[in-house]
Image: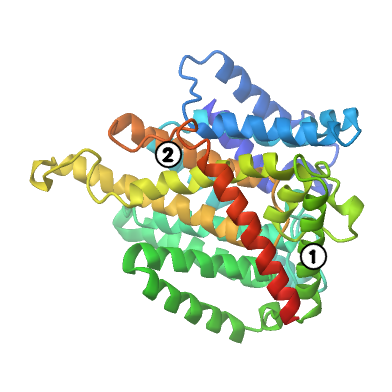
Amino acid sequence: MFLFMLAFIALIIIRPQEYPALAGTIPVPLLPLSIAGAAACWLFSSRKTFAAPQYLLLLAFLLALMMSKVVNGWMGGALMVLSRFGLCVVAFVLIANAMNTRRRIHAAMVVFCLCALVLAIHGIDQVRTGIGWTGAELSQGTRIQYIGIFGDPNDLGLLFAMCVPMALYLSGRGGAMGLRRLFWWAVSAVLLYGIVLTDSRGTLLAVAAMVGVYIWMRRGVVAAGAMVAAALGVMMMLPSRLQQMEVGEASAMGRVVSWYHGLQMFFGKPVLGVGAGAYSDIYYLTAHNSFVLVLAESGFIGFSIWIAFLGYCILMPLAAVRSPLPPGTVDPADVDPAVMADWQVDRKLAAALMLSMCGFLAAGFFLSRSYVVVLYMLAALVTAQYWDMKTRHPALQAFSLGHDIIRWPAYTAAGIAGLYVGVKVLLAIA
């Protein structure tokens, strides 16, 4: 199952099966075969696990999306949702089960980063020649893009941003007389350059958010705020679309107006929303906000479930990051040095994955990326890594959906109220 899922990750990102030059030359459907092979191995595996609350939440979210179509009068729409979002659910379950050791999680991160590097090199070649080896041309004449699900510069930049913390973590493992560290530093630099070439404002904000969270973990809130402000100042000086970022600018104003219409959709049908995929049928623009999109299309029920799913994907690594000593330790002098060293590696890995998740969600606030498979692949790595730690450190905090069953709807209601007030303020300013 592990090797099948590594192949699945590579095929999802590089997508050779969609290269025009290879059209008709690949005799078998590579992507379906990889996930079918992993599913077959998983069915016969004796080490299945559904311990993390994310498993139940993601299944419940799928059902909420399907029901959102049914209650809006289209029974067949439930099957459409199943066929489209079902891949995200299957990918999450299989990756979270396959990457059940730290060594396997490292391997998955290596595949993510190297595949993203291929796409960045494709973009650099695209800038040089005007067209990449996939046949994809520059978007808007200046912004790099790829093919398939990365055919939008925003999606491409989001992948690069997500992989930067992974590459930097891998650089910290040293080895090979320092060459490994230099290699992963070079990969990080190329990915950051790729982000610049996408000219995606949401992705640049994701980088700023990751820098802020990292400084917050190391130095506290004040230092993090100062660093984010400095990072945004530097980015604003770069020749990019970020210089146009203000409420009154046409693109930004269009986003805010779309958020307002999304909230009106929610207020009109607050329980299960207007139906998955129906946002752009009602309003001519997409939501340009992953949170507004889920709220409008799946209502309070679906949004609460989705927020809980993402919330655990932040709280789990955060629990490890906040614990400088192995869980259950009372006296630091009692900790075996080998155990302490092992725990510190776990903390660094958890921090890297949390930064990737924070970057994705920060960009997702300005992009409609609620249902993309890459988000759920990343969430699977977060879940797998936490339960690997939990297996080796039983005293690590346990997360129970039953314990938080009231908390998440309350957080959701507060978030909706905050979102509504924020949108009204932005409209007033504009």
Residue 257 picture quarter: bottom right
Question: On residue 9, which mark appears?
Answer: none
For the residue pair 416 and 302, the one nearer the viewer reads as 416
Secondary structure state at the residue bearing disc 2: helix
Q: CA distance from mark 2 to mark 1?
A: 39 Å
Callout 2, which amino acid?
Gln
The residue drawn where x is 72% and y is 70% is 424
Quarter of the image with the N terminus is top right
Categorize mark 1 by other alpha carbons within 10 Å: few (<14), some (14-19), many (20+).
Answer: some
Residue that badge 1 annotates = 131
Q: Of tags 2 and 1, which is closer to the observer?
A: 2
Q: Is residue 31 visible?
A: no
Q: Is residue 352 left or right of residue 348?
A: right
Which element carries disc 1, helix, strand or loop? Answer: loop
**For residue 189, side relative to residue 390 (left or right):** right
Look at mark 2 in the image and give the residue it sits on: 385
- Report the front residue among 399 and 17: 399
Residue pictured at 70% horizontal, 52% vertical: 369
Residue at image point 44% right, 31% down:
100
The location of residue 382, given as percent across then percent down, is 48, 42
Residue in the picture at 36% in, 46% down: 319
Judge by depth and name the residue closer to the eye, 21 or 61: 61
From what the image shows, is residue 2 above or below residue 291? above
Decide: few, some or many residues near mark 2? Use Cα within 10 Å; few <14, some 14-19, many ≥20.
many
Q: Earlier in the sequence, mark 2 or mark 1?
A: 1
Residue 224's image quarter? bottom left
In the rendered image, the vertical position of residue 146 relative to residue 13, given as above or below: below
Give x and y (percent) for residue 218: 33, 65
In x, y percent, where is residue 125? Answer: 70, 66
Question: Is residue 198 at least partly visible in the picture?
Answer: yes
Residue type highlighted by circle 1 = Ile
